Image (cartoon, rainbow, N blue to C red):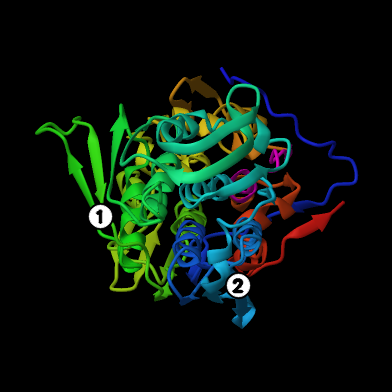
Amino acid sequence: MSPKQSTPADSQGMTVVEVLPGGPVCGSIQPPGSKSLTNRALLCAAFADGVSTLSGALRSEDTEVMIEAIESIGVSVVATDGGRSLVVDAVNRSQLKAADHRLDLFIANSGTTIRFLTAALSAAGGHFLLHGVERMHERPIADLIDALVPVQEGSIATQSPNGCPPVLIQSDGWSGETLSVAGAVSSQYLSGLMMAAPIAAGRSGGTSRSTSLRVEGELVSVPYVQMTAEVMRCFSAEVSLDKTGDEDSSPLQINIKAGGYHSQDYAIEPDASAASYFWAAAAITGGDVTVNGLSRDALQGDVGFCDVLEQMGCEIIHGEDSIRVIGATLHGVDVDMNEISDTVQTLSIVALFADAPTRVRGVAHNRFKETDRIGDLAIELRKLGAVVDEHDDGLTIHPLTETDSFSGATLKTYHDHRMAMSLSLAGLRLPGVKILDPACTSKTYPEYFADLEQLIGRAHHWSN
């Protein structure tokens, strides 16, 4: 069961959107830039040695939070082309460690921002308080803090019960070169430490040092760690990911050589997690949707969502710069989604229209996202008439059996962008599905409902 049940805001007076059914969805689309890549590139550029230009960037609540945070430490970010191009000038960041007063950074509910900056600012040195909205202060970060304490020259600690933010940092950099981190809760902890390593400075007069990171136990969302390494390499960091033994289960060790980051011009891929909604639209409706700008070789592991759709019966056509999904009769599957956990909610809607149950495994860490993405998801799927079995590491979704008699449902989003986007897809097949608080998609995809409307070729119904 859920460790803590989310409590959505009162729905009275809240905007509601209803996506209307209308047959197979056919067309092509290119989602905005990847949030994961945008925030990683912003972090590396903010601690590089000059001016970097990021093209294809995502402009959303999460990336705005990262931009405002790095601006508060002296980094200039100039946006053009509607925010899709960002010029990041880090030349004034040298004042950071000399600051003799505390800087308070508001992180809202951006997990990537607080995890990446906690590690980076710990390594860079200075006096900071990182805080956010109420839900952020309920999201554990203790494993990251525990990894930093042994190497911290100064102090770093959480300010809420159970190892949750705010995070208070009083740092003169790192005094050690070897760190260990638990891998089972969030790969963002490891990614944060990885990106901080080239920044790290200790007693040795502020010089960069080589760093080794050891992952203790199972590592979730491995593709995100590989993505982090690739972004770091693009900004001139030397990173190697090595197993410490011959078995697949052997602990991972990451070695990062001294040298720091160098400014770059960096192009950001479209967001593969966002693309999953459009691929799912094809699967759910028996349609034909092409997502442009992504390929099988994309940095983002979430393109693997298409492999699951293929197991369910869809036809997948991989182009040099596109992935096309053609819907067909859907079959239930038993799938470990540890490496593509941000697409679990998307798959759950597809599973409603399969011919047999779908078992999702390996995503226990989803309980600690913007909301409990196992327990809260199960609650909302049941409102659609589904039978859902909740497990510690995922859930089993049984197909809908009486869609002809379905009379509608109002679904809560728990202010979770992925709940809003995924649950809205049920409306492509079921009448009367209303989504509360659709504006919460601004966290990663402000134009989602407009883009979905354009793809399906009909207007949604909006009300209060």
Q: How many marks?
A: 2
Q: Which residues are magenta?
A: 409-422
Q: Is residue 416 magenta?
A: yes
Which quadrant holds residue 446? bottom right
Q: Residues within 10 Å of mark 2 (few under 14, many from 20)?
A: many
Which sits in the foreground, 421 or 443?
443
| Identity, as a three-letter code, of the amino acid under mark 2 | Ser
Q: The N terminus appears in which quarter of the rendering?
A: top right
Determine whether the residue tagged by mark 1 lies in a helix, strand or loop: loop
Which sits in the foreground, 245 or 101?
101
Q: Residue furthest bottom?
A: 81
Determine which residue is flagged by label 1.
Answer: 257
Q: Residue 137 vs residue 30: left or right?
A: right
Q: Residue 231 vs residue 37: left or right?
A: left
User: In the image, residue 253 lies at what x, y percent?
Assistant: 23, 39
Determine which residue is flagged by label 2.
Answer: 76
| Circles 2 and 1 in contact, beta carbons < 8 Å | no
User: In the image, residue 197 lies at what x, y percent?
Assistant: 37, 50
Q: Residue at x 70, y 38 (%)?
A: 414
